[in-house]
Amino acid sequence: MTAQLRIYPSKFCDILRTKDLMKHLPEEARFCSEHGEEVIISESELLPNQNGGVPFARAAFVGCCDSAIRKLNSAIIAESLKRGVPVN
């Protein structure tokens, strides 16, 4: 089973920061406790000739189930607040 949570284009600029935050989270936050799979951020292929526009068409959190994605999102928000990084 695969679950996805769409990342809206207005949030694409936050993806690199979010991936960096994810690297520093404990495995318990990044991996599903039931299925053992890691939640990742997946981007579609790069769009040609963007000249400062969004670099890809789609992005999403992808995991084995909705609860794993929700758990990771909660951990990202908590870590962002701890670091004083704005959360939108």
Image: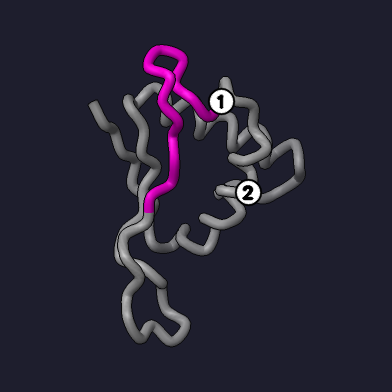
Instruction: Give the residue pinned by disc 2.
Output: 20
Q: Residue 46, image x and y in percent?
A: 35, 70
Span highlighted in magenta in the image: 30-42
The magenta stretch spans residue 3 = no
* Residue at the extreme left of the image, as rendered: 1
Q: Is residue 18 above or below residue 29?
A: below
Measuring from the top left, give residue 26's x and y in whole percent.
64, 26
Picture quadrant of residue 54: bottom left
Say above or below: 38 vs 52: above
**Residue shown at 31% from the left, 65% from the top:** 45
Percent across and percent down for residue 41 are 43, 46
Q: Amino acid at mark 1?
A: Ala
Magenta region, main secondary structure = loop
State the SS at label 1.
helix
Three-letter amino acid code at the position of disc 2: Asp
Of labels 2 and 1, earlier in sequence is 2
Residue 12 - label: none
Quarter placement of the N terminus: top left
Mark 2 neighbour density, 10 Å: few (under 14) some (14–19) many (20 or more)? few
Q: Quadrant of residue 39?
A: top left
Instruction: Evaluate if marks 2 and 1 touch, with contact meaning CB atoms under 8 Å apart.
Output: no
- In this rendering, the answer to whether 18 lies above or below 46 is above
Q: Is residue 2 above or below residue 35?
A: below
Q: Position of residue 75 (x, y in %)?
A: 59, 30
Residue 38 located within the stretch drawn in magenta: yes
| Mark 2 residue element | helix
User: Extreme front residue here?
Assistant: 36
**Which residue corresponds to mark 1?**
29
Residue occupying image coordinates x 57% and y 48%:
18
Q: Residue at x 32, y 25 (%)?
A: 65
Please indicate whether residue 11 sits to the left or right of residue 19 in the image: left
Number of numbered discs present?
Answer: 2
